[in-house]
Image (cartoon, rainbow, N blue to C red):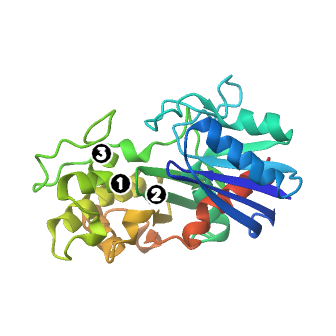
């Protein structure tokens, strides 16, 4: 049996399955301080019987370098108390099984590429827009890792002409994409989530414009076929359509892939992250 953890800043999703797509049991716990959260997760897995491997798809930043002494750690995260948490080490010691470890968005990208919206495609990017903004990229079946992992939410978009005063909320960069277009950034300057604002509110145009700058850049730099947009903010009615339209406008019919580039909702819905975690367990 495989175990999987989708470790988010708000909640941990836990699952066991006979395969990445055959989930037998699923459970959620709130993300508290590391000691409490990891212990609760461990106790739940122990109640499910033995597992042969565990996959962890975690919020970041994380260390993915297998030769590093900090492999499997969450590093300099803005999540209070979680910096330098040895996530993989805790579960390896507790269960004595192989551990697969990657970012939550890389896990979701793998899942969508193999079993969801990108099935049959050679390239897929998964972007989550919620409490934060992050992205994972799969090329030829493998997630992209370089010196570390992509941090797509921390690019610097051109400021919208009607959004020049807001400083941004990212503790590291202020007005990067996450600092301007994440759920908390939207509430910080308009007082409500995007889905609660009137349909004709300028916020819809502004946020779609910022997200389209990321999707357009992804197409320009990686020629990815499929871009999946997930997360709580993307559940706002018509936002996906607005991002798609603005991406087309920014591309100005230049990119050679043309209609082969698709911007779509997750095929796996809210199961992308935990399915990715189980895929990481299977690979481990």
Q: Which residue is mark 2?
A: 127
Determine if residue 242 is in view.
yes
Mark 2 or mark 3, whichever is nearer to me: 3
The numbered mark, 2 or 3, whose residue comes first in the sequence reads 2
Q: CA distance from mark 2 to mark 3?
A: 15 Å
Describe residue 111's horizontal placement relative to residue 207 as left or right.
right
Vertical relation: 134 (above or below) 147: below
Residue 174 x/y as whole percent: 26, 38
Residue 199 x/y as whole percent: 21, 77
Q: Are marks 1 and 2 in contact (CB under 8 Å)?
A: yes
Dot 1 falls on a residue whose secondary structure is helix
Describe residue 134's horizontal placement relative to residue 199 as left or right.
right
Q: Which mark is residue 179?
A: 3
Give the residue displayed 31% in from the left and 60% down from the top: 212
Based on the displayed image, in which of its 4 quarters is residue 108 positioned?
A: bottom right
Based on the displayed image, in which of its 4 quarters is residue 179 positioned?
A: top left
Residue 256 x/y as whole percent: 40, 64
């Amino acid at each position: 049996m495989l175990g999987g953890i989708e470790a988010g800043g708000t909640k941990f999703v836990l699952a066991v399955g006979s395969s990445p797509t055959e989930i037998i049991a699923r459970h959620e716990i709130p993300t508290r301080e590391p000691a409490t959260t990891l212990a609760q997760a461990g106790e739940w897995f122990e109640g499910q019987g033995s597992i042969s491997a565990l996959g962890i798809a975690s919020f970041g930043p994380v260390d993915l370098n297998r030769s590093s002494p900090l492999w499997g750690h969450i590093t300099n995260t803005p999540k209070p108390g979680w910096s330098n948490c040895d996530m993989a080490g805790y579960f390896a010691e507790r269960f004595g099984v192989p551990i697969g470890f990657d970012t939550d968005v890389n896990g979701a990208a793998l899942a969508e590429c193999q079993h969801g919206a990108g099935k049959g495609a050679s390239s897929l990017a998964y972007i989550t827009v919620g409490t934060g903004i992050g992205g994972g990229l799969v090329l030829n079946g493998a997630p992209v890792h370089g010196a570390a992992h992509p941090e797509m939410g921390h690019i610097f978009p051109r400021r919208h002409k009607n959004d020049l005063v807001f400083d941004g909320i990212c503790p590291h960069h202020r007005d990067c994409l996450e600092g301007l277009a994440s759920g908390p950034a939207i509430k910080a300057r308009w007082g409500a989530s995007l889905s609660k604002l009137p349909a004709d509110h300028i916020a819809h145009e502004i946020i779609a414009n910022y997200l389209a700058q990321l999707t357009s850049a992804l197409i320009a730099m990686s020629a990815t076929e499929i871009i999946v947009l997930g997360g709580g903010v993307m559940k706002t009615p018509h936002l996906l359509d607005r991002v798609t339209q603005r991406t087309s406008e920014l591309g100005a019919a230049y990119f050679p892939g043309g209609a082969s580039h698709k911007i779509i909702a997750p095929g796996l819905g809210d199961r992308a992250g935990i399915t990715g975690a189980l895929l990481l367990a299977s690979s481990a």
